Image (tube, helix red, strand yellow):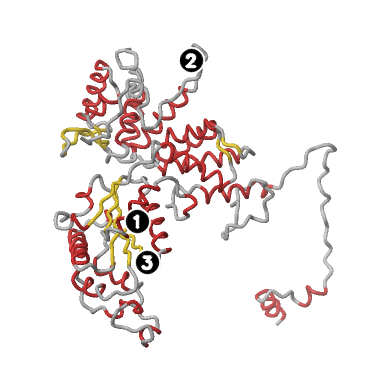
Amino acid sequence: MSWINSLMARSFGRKPKAAQNAQPNLVFAAPPAVREGAPAKKPLDAAFPRFQSMAGDQLSPRLNDRFASARIKLRSAFTPSQPITDRRMFAGRVDVLTTLIRSIEDQRVHVIMYGERGIGKTSLVHVLTRAAEEARYIVVYCSCGAGSTFDEIFRAVAADVPLLFHSGFAPTADASERGGTLADLLPATVLTPRLVADLFAKLTGTRVLVVLDEFDVCDSPEFRRNIAELIKNLSDRSIRTQLVIAGVAADLTELVEHIPSIRRNIFALQVPKMSATEVNHLVENGEELSGLTYDKAATEFIVFVANGSPYLASLLSHHSGLAAIDKGRTNVAVEDVSLAVDQALTEFRGRISRHSQLQIDHAAKTGVRHVLGVMAGAALFNNGRFDDRDIDALYPSAANAASFKATIEELASRQILLETHEDEYGRGYRFSEEAVLPYLWILAAQKRFLESRKPAATDKPAVPTTPDKAPVAEKAAAEKPADKPAEAAGATPRAAGRP
């Protein structure tokens, strides 16, 4: 049975008795000789990439990196992939936030926020809800999905409102003390706008703010029709519940259907792009929280390329901060922002189809990519649209403007990155792929900014135009000199597609 005992011992991690008493003859190899003065080799594991912090956001005890703490702070200071929830990081938009609060509090209307992707709608919603919660509003945040239904959304809303605030239940009632909610009073049948309005009409002692974010994702006509009907019911009966709706759209009617019947009951706000001052403020906030400092030229570079986009500003600030830390510095320079721009371009290019990538590369060879980049900057916050009036505003010289118009018309007719577009503003152009816009704009903006820093023949440093103005175009195809910037000519580029 010795072999069975040996097997059982192995199974339970014990050595066989014979092995315990044995004294094996072990031979140890001599360590390899080390040459005198030779540098010690780092263990292979030391060079292997590791996470810089633990899951609880504490520093990893394995690291001796004196910049590890700065990395953690930088991640919290700039969050390009996440909305702003910390009011300390909310830059600018004070007037917008004040207007929203007054619309809800003083006018008792429902709010609709709309605008382009990356313009900061969700961040604005989060900061608004924090302000409402401080005022003891009951705030229910719902992110809409493609399959969201009216019944699903408002059963979830009712579940967050305590029965304590229902006029039919005393605070000492058993149902109130047990933590009951308005959802306990809902019927098993599918909810309608009238049933929801009847329920919320019983609210007393509080106000409810229902936030419907990503509203554009749900394209169900029935869902939108029910929301419009609910707004009318709540407004007509002065019920203590208001809606805040946010979504990607070029205009109000694109976001919400059946508007005419409720237009007087809503306040609609198209979220504007940030001013250069506000983007500066965003970078300054990040400096304070991260402990990094951004050179004046580095900040100007970020402001210029961001072009009013809080997403781009945060993305470039984050990447450039990491680039500086990787070099053992807490000071962010232009070269760090340039590396950040290159990284952003790599990220955006990965979101573009292979077909469009090839067209972009061909446009670079033919010398029209920079012109497309300038127009992408004009269309970035106008649903990807621009028209001849934008070209006239950006290129005052009639000769060059005519040349650019002909080039753009040819590209659109051949469906190379562009397509013609007819709408209420007339005939214009749209970029055929959404991800192409920021990619082309960042390429053009980086080129323009870096060229502006090269000393001129008089050894005077060139000053770039502000992001709110147009960059200088490349030379026209016929070897004609580029136009002067619209700013220098006293023209302000018109928002694409706007009268």
Identity, as a three-letter code, of the amino acid under mark 3: Tyr
The residue shown at (17%, 61%) is 225
Left or right: where 368 falls relative to 402: right
Identity, as a three-letter code, of the amino acid under mark 2: Ala
Q: Secondary structure at mark 2?
A: loop
Q: Nearer the viewer, mark 3 or mark 2?
A: 3
Query: What residue sits right under mark 1 in the picture?
Result: 101
Total numbered badges shown on the rendered structure: 3
59 to 181, vertically: above or below: above
Q: Could you tell me how far apart the alpha carbons at marks 3 and 2 are, in whole angstroms?
A: 59 Å
126 to 416, vertically: above or below: below
Where residue 239 sits, quadrant-wise, is bottom left
Where residue 233 sits, quadrant-wise, is bottom left
Q: Earlier in the sequence, mark 3 or mark 2?
A: 3
Picture coordinates of residue 475 (x, y %)?
34, 17
Q: Nearer the viewer, mark 2 or mark 1?
A: 1
Query: What residue sits right under mark 2 in the picture?
Result: 456
Q: Are marks 3 and 2 in contact (CB under 8 Å)?
A: no
Q: Which mark is residue 137?
A: 3
Q: Which mark is residue 227?
A: none
Q: Earlier in the sequence, mark 3 or mark 1?
A: 1
Q: Secondary structure at mark 3?
A: loop
Query: 189 or 196: nearer the eye?
Result: 196
